[in-house]
């Protein structure tokens, strides 16, 4: 029997009210003032329409009130999620891709001069054409820590210039060619003779966070080499369709380095690092977890802000016997237990990128059911089918609203956590005074980078 007119009105009013109420509640990160009213109104209307349609369809087939509630919850949640996601992706890609790719290729004026050191890709003797490394590659290569900063933090002059290798998406035509170029650069610079070798996985745009490399360069006195190979020019949320290509690039790079190190009497400590989509990509390159880490001879891995979902859950399980997950440096055990965890996950309780996954559309996630809730997960935040999914999706768009030098441990901003976490994860040494000076230096280095970006 079709839903009666009175029921239609009641369903419409109740659904719209529920959508408006839940969407107006606190979320994981602050939204700009203009965003929340628009999202609230949209969700209220869409929820009412979707609920009415679902109720009508179920009513036509017949069904009890509990059955209606159960089916409606799943239909509303899935309908809202699929519709919003499809529309958002199509609009974002059609409007932004060409412009963003052009911006990703353009090297800013503050970083236009190629590096002057032969230990940096694009510098003297390099096999990489500096004009091909793109915006993010130029920033990364131009950010190597100078001797003065290292001495100010540690009290010691660095023994050598650090090595940074970066191969951009435009530096070679295929993943195989880009990786071959990176391996040639590692050999050219003597990277395998350093004490530490960091294999980084950049984000979709090619962004390779300099901060963890800064920490290594300072605390090891330059006895480190870092390498990253780009696989695209678009931001991570527009690069989700490139995860397979990106993980292939990482797998080729890791396997190539493993082959180069085989049989060497002296080899560097092999360290892995990935942040955001880069973390997902690097994990996808070693899907077996601990057995793959053994195979490649990895000494330590740090993955920061890994996007949520079934892949993340599966990988956590694959390394559970030798991993630790923290929300912030205050959770680092003191002392760190022996044997030390080889795998470290830094994941904020309130990071929407970590918390966002498809099942939120129709199932309450554990992090909204537990009491007390995790840090920066509001007690007032509610769950409703579909609506919370959209809330958290919108959260991801504003999860990294950061200001240079103003480090805040919140959302998808991990800058305030990296100094201490990188130190612990990679078994580096820093007494309290050195650690405090390191934090000051990291903020100063970021401000200096931001000023060079502003010059553009």
Image (cartoon, grey):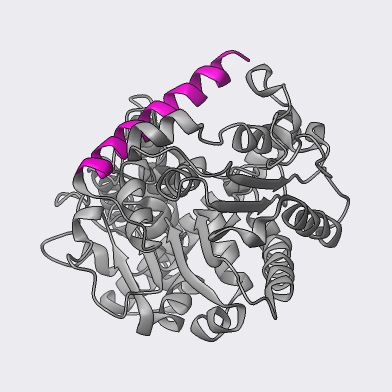
Coordinates of residue 354 in the picture (x, y in percent):
40, 58
**On the image, which quarter does residue 233 sit in?**
top right
Decide which of 282, 446 is in the foreground and name it.
446
From the image, which quarter does the C terminus lie in?
A: top right
- Relative horizontal placement of residue 311, taking residue 442 as reference (left or right): right
Q: Give the magenta part as a residue range.
A: 433-456
Residue 190 sits above or below residue 128 on the image? below
Rendered residue at 73%/35% (across/down): 134
Q: Is residue 442 magenta?
A: yes
Coordinates of residue 75 in the picture (x, y in percent):
44, 66
Q: Is residue 24 magenta?
A: no
Residue 447 sits above or below residue 426 on the image? above
Answer whether residue 56 is visible to the viewer in this image: no
Rendered residue at 35%/58% (across/down): 347
Q: Residue furthest right?
A: 173
Image mark count: 0
Decide which of 53, 139 is in the foreground and name it.
139
- Relative horizontal placement of residue 80, taking residue 328 as reference (left or right): right
């Amino acid at each position: 029997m079709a839903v009666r007119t009175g029921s239609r009105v009641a369903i419409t009013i109740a659904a719209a009210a529920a959508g408006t109420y839940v969407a107006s509640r606190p979320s994981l990160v602050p939204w700009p003032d203009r965003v929340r009213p628009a999202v609230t109104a949209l969700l209220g209307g869409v929820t009412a329409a979707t609920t009415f349609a679902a109720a009508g369809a179920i009513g036509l087939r017949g069904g009890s009130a509990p059955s209606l509630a159960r089916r409606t919850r799943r239909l509303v949640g899935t309908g809202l999620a699929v519709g919003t996601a499809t529309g958002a992706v199509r609009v974002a890609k059609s409007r932004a891709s060409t412009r963003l790719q052009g911006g990703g290729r353009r090297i800013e004026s503050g970083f236009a001069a190629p590096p002057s050191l032969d230990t940096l890709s694009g510098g003297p003797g390099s096999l990489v054409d500096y004009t091909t490394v793109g915006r993010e590659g130029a920033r990364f290569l131009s950010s190597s820590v100078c001797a003065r900063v290292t001495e100010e933090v540690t009290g010691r002059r660095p023994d050598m210039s650090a090595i940074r290798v970066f191969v951009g998406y435009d530096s070679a035509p295929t993943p195989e060619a880009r990786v071959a170029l990176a391996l040639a650069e590692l050999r050219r610079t003597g990277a395998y003779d350093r004490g530490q070798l960091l294999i980084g996985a950049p984000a979709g745009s090619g962004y390779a966070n300099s901060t963890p490399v800064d920490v290594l360069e300072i605390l090891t006195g330059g006895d480190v080499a870092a390498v990253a190979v780009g696989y695209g020019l678009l931001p991570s949320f527009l690069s989700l369709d490139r995860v397979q290509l990106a993980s292939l690039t990482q797998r080729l790079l890791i396997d190539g380095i493993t082959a180069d190190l085989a049989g060497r009497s002296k080899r560097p400590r092999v360290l892995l690092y990935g942040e955001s989509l880069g973390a997902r990509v690097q994990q996808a390159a070693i899907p077996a977890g601990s057995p793959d880490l053994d195979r490649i001879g990895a000494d330590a891995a740090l993955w920061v802000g890994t996007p949520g979902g079934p892949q993340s859950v599966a990988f956590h399980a694959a390394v559970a016997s030798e991993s630790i997950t923290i929300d912030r440096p205050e959770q680092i055990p003191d002392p760190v237990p022996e044997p030390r965890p080889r795998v470290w996950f830094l994941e904020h309780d309130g990071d929407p990128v970590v918390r966002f996954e498809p099942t939120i559309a129709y199932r309450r996630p554990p992090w909204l059911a537990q009491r007390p809730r995790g840090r920066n997960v509001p007690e007032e935040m509610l769950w409703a089918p579909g609506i919370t999914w959209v809330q958290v999706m919108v959260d991801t768009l504003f999860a990294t609203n950061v200001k240079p030098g103003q480090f805040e441990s919140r959302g998808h901003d991990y800058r305030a956590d990296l100094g201490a976490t990188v130190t612990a994860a990679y078994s580096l040494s820093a007494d309290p005074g050195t650690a405090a000076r390191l934090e000051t230096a990291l903020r100063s280095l970021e401000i200096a980078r931001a000023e060079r970006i502003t010059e553009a």
